[in-house]
Amino acid sequence: MSKTLEVKNVSKIWPEIRALANVNFSLEKGEIHAIIGPNGAGKSTFFGVISGELEPSIGEIWFEGQKVNEFPAWKRTRMGMSRAFQVPKIFPSLSIEENLMTTLRIYEKWKGHLGWKGFWKSSAWAASKVKESLSEVGLYEQREKIVKNISHGDKKRLEIAIAITLEPQLLLLDEPTAGMSPEDTMETVKLIQKIHDLYQPTILLTEHDMEVVFTLADRITVLNRGEVIVTGEPMEIRSNDLVKELYLGKEDGLYAAHS
């Protein structure tokens, strides 16, 4: 299989802190890959280095066959990398529809279909895309609601809608079910699988909920203290003694439920 992303010998070092240590990692095109590990393992730093928010101290990031170390986050987004954050980064005073429309108009500008003068004039394509994307995530009927008044789960779904609207080759999901009720978590898992089935993006996610990880992931990478401990299919990860000791727990109920 061809690779969407390759991380080669990457370290991220601050004074007295080594957040990532000689990380080697790759994503096969079209897979769903989960990054897990205890708090402080380096997951957020890893996502930041991939998305362009952080520059690696050492090593290389390759996306779609191109070295992107010096590319800022916006340029990686234009190349086809899209991210939804643990804490949704959306405009609280705008409506659901306006949040998505803002993204779409910028996207049209990138593609050369729009001048800044017509930024707030909705094109037929953008209006159609709003309906399509919001319908996919179950928010179309609420499209006129102001974002600060909607639930946490709906904010996360809106950010996923914004991310997929950019038609990414790589979709980065940072703790997509964090803070959700069990019901919202189940619906979000179904949504991620639906998006993958419909659009076939490569998906990389971080997630603490092992139920979510083992349900979605084709492969799993375990980080600990900034180092890759193991990468493998879910069955390999569940049976790995070191992973159980460091993260899952030998007597942990979540682990036992998936044994």
Image (cartoon, helix red, strand yellow):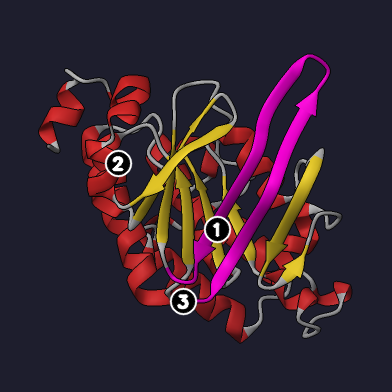
SS class, disc 1: strand
Instruction: Please provide percent x and percent y for residue 214.
Output: 26, 46
Q: Residue 120, which numbered label?
A: none
* Residue 193 image-quadrant placement: bottom left
Measure the alpha-carbon separation of dots 3 and 1.
11 Å
Determine which quarter of the picture holds residue 100: bottom right
Q: Find the distance from the CA under tag 2 to the CA under tag 3.
A: 22 Å
Label located before the other in sequence (2 or 3): 3
Q: Is residue 99 left or right of residue 181?
A: right
| Residue type of the residue flagged with mark 3 | Met
Q: Could you say which is closer to the camera, residue 55 or residue 246?
A: 246
Mark 3 or mark 1: whose residue is earlier in sequence: 3
Residue position marked by numbered label 1 in the rendering: 26
Three-letter amino acid code of the residue under disc 2: Ile
Q: Residues within 10 Å of mark 1 (few under 14, many from 20)?
A: some
- Magenta: main secondary structure equals strand
Q: Magenta stretch?
A: 1-30
Taking the magenta stretch, the answer to whether it contains residue 23 is: yes
Label 2 residue SS: helix
Tell me the amino acid under the disc marked 1: Ser
Q: Spot the residue most to the top.
A: 16
Give the residue at mark 2. Answer: 237
The residues bearing labels 2 and 1 have C-alpha atoms spaced at a distance of 17 Å
Q: Which residue is mark 3?
A: 1
Locate the C terminus and report the quarter of the image it occupies: top left
Give the quadrant of residue 115. Answer: bottom right
Circle 3 Cα neighbour tier, 10 Å, few/some/many (<14 / 14–19 / ≥20)? few
Q: Is residue 23 above or below residue 139?
A: above
Residue extending farthest front: 241
The residue positioned 78% from the left and 64% from the top of the image is 67
236 shown above or below 78: above
Residue 229 drawn at (x, y percent): 46, 35
